Amino acid sequence: MDSYLYFIMALLPLTSILLICQINPYRALVIRGIFGAIAALAYTVLGAADVALTEALVGTLLVVMLYAIAVRSSLVLRLGVLEDEITTLETSPSKHFSQLMDYFRTIFKQYQMKVELVSYSNRENLVKALQEREIHAICLQSGSEALEEENASPAYQTVTRLQRVYEIMTTQPVSSLTDVIYEELSTKKGLFS
């Protein structure tokens, strides 16, 4: 065998290790495409043109496109809020609510996630949407607007049904604008019962 074949074969385990160690899903997609291209090249050099063509089309092109669609659709946090909050945000932005949304966007941007606001007409529909798993979390006004006081309670309460979202929110610098609560929906007793 020629020395270039050893080099190509050495790239396969190297790219697979890089792929496994990757945290950012978009970088993992790029590395997966490179891995597929190297595998197709290796098959071509070894004389298996049919396997190389299959690897190039399926293993590289199709798989990367499907992964890209899956990653893109799964990296959205659907946050339920009341219609009044969104209307207020669009017409005359509430200082506290807009700060809270900026806080959420900053936190989840580190994890390549987008925050999508989903509005509901009343509190009952909002809670029902969380229970039926239409949304990942809800953000409700807690009634206390006196944030200027030092020991005042936060103006909003954020409830999530996903343990990982709760962990992300609580490991970041705590916002004075919201209390974060994890509500396991499988339990009979809880915030919504």
Image (cartoon, grey):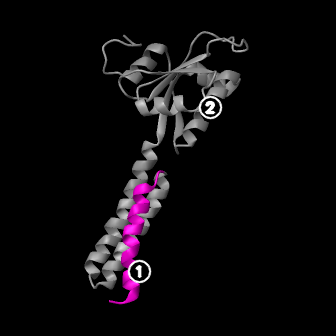
The residue at the point 63 percent across, 21 percent down is: 177
Q: Is residue 91 above or below residue 62?
A: above
For the residue marked with disc 1, what is the amino acid? Phe
The residue at the point 41 percent across, 59 percent down is: 19
Q: Is residue 191 above or below residue 168?
A: above
Q: What is the distance, in whole Å, between disc 2 and disc 1 at their CAs?
A: 47 Å
For the residue marked with disc 2, what is the amino acid? Tyr
| Residue 127 left/right relative to 81 | left
Asked where in the image residue 149 lies, by quadrant, the reply is top right
Residue 94 showing in the rendered view: no
Give the labeled residue for mark 2.
103
> What mark, if any, has residue 7 been given in the picture?
1
Image position, residue 130 (x, y; %): 41, 23
Magenta residue span? 1-23
| Residue 20 left/right relative to 139 | left
> Is residue 53 found inside the magenta-colored segment of the image?
no
Q: From this viewpoint, which residue is outermost toward the right?
A: 148
Front tag of 2 and 1: 1
Most common secondary structure along the magenta stretch: helix
Between 113 and 184, the one nearer to me in the picture? 184
